[in-house]
Each structure stands twice: as C-alpha cells, then as structure tokens.
Image: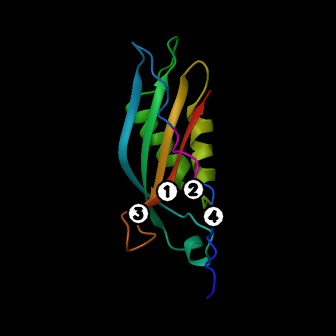
Amino acid sequence: MAMMQLLLRPLPPPAPAAPPRDAGQVVLVVRDLVVTTLIGIYDYEHVKPQRLRLNLELAMAPSDTAPWTYADLVTTARRIVTEGHTNLLECLAERLATALLSPNRALTALIRLEKLDAFEECEAVGVEIVRSA
C-alpha cells in the first residue's frame, strides 16, 4: 500500500487592505476604466494589444494646493498605461503609483489592474497594490 504524500504550500498573503481613511479625507475614485495597451511577457503580447481594467482610489493630501481632478487622473492613468509595452502588471501598477503619489498632492493610492482577455474561463486576472507617498 503506497503512502500518499501531502503537498504543503504556504498560504498566500492576504490581499492588501484599502488605504486607511480619516474623517474629512477626500478620496478620488476611478472605477472600471478600460484601456487597450501592449502588456505581457509572451511574444504575441508584444504585438497584440489587450484590454486592461483600471480601478483607482487616491486619498488626497489635506494641504493639497494643486488637487487632482477626475479628468487629470483618467488622462494620466491612460497615458501611463499606453506609453509603450510593459512586461508585468506589477511594474505598471508601480509606475502608476509613482506618478500619482506625492506628500503634497496624494497620500495613498489603491491601484487594481486587470487583464480582461487573458483567460476564457474567468472574467479577469490582475494585481492590486496599496502605496503611500
């Protein structure tokens, strides 16, 4: 009788929590912005654009002298996502965080990026990060 060996894997880390919010804090939200861009490590992903869904939450700095507007946020996100090929969603999310955060403008950002057409059997695959200025 053969013994079955259990494969033990560590539990995945928990999903990042939403940025902490204080009473009176303003959080700009962009929901379900769909952008077509070149992303991925496979050869075909270097030539065939894919749809990405972006969800952004940006907690504004209280002393913000040049606040983000919805239009600024959408335009900046669209520009960063479409400015050339990116290998990994994780790298693209970090670039977005770097562009959006500053101590005098935005304190925290939640960025969720999802490939909508990667697998037929699921709606989307993606990454979510939370960063602070």
Q: State the SS at label 2.
A: helix
Q: CA distance from mark 2 to mark 4?
A: 28 Å
Q: Which residue is mark 3?
A: 116
Mark toward the viewer: 1 or 4: 4
| Residue at (39% x, 12% y) in the render | 24
Residue type, label 4: Leu
- The part of the chain drawn in magenta is 12-16
Q: Secondary structure at mark 4?
A: loop
- Nearer the observer, disc 2 or disc 4? 4
Which residue corresponds to mark 4? 8
Picture disc at residue 39? none
Mark 2: few/some/many CA within 10 Å (<14, 14-19, 20+) = many
Tell me where residue 83 appears, x and y as whole percent.
57, 54
Compared to residue 52, the image places residue 119 above or below, namely: below
Give me the residue at 57% from left, 42% from top. 96
Residue at 42% across, 17% down: 25
Q: Hey, what amino acid is under mark 2?
A: Leu
CA gap between label 1 and label 3 equals 9 Å
C-alpha gap between disc 3 and disc 2: 12 Å
Which of the pair 13/16 is nearer the observer? 13
The percent position of residue 22, horizontal first and vertical second, equals 45, 16
Q: Quadrant of the C terminus?
A: top right
Look at label 1 and name its amino acid: Gly
Magenta span includes 14: yes
How far apart are the alpha carbons under marks 2 and 1? 7 Å
In the rendered structure, find residue 89 and report the number of the disc placed on it: 2
Instruction: Indicate which disc, 1 or 4, sits on the residue closer to the N terminus.
Output: 4
Chain-order first, disc 3 or disc 4: 4
- Kindly give the residue lying farthest to the bottom in the view shown: 1
Q: Which quarter of the figure has residue 55?
A: top left
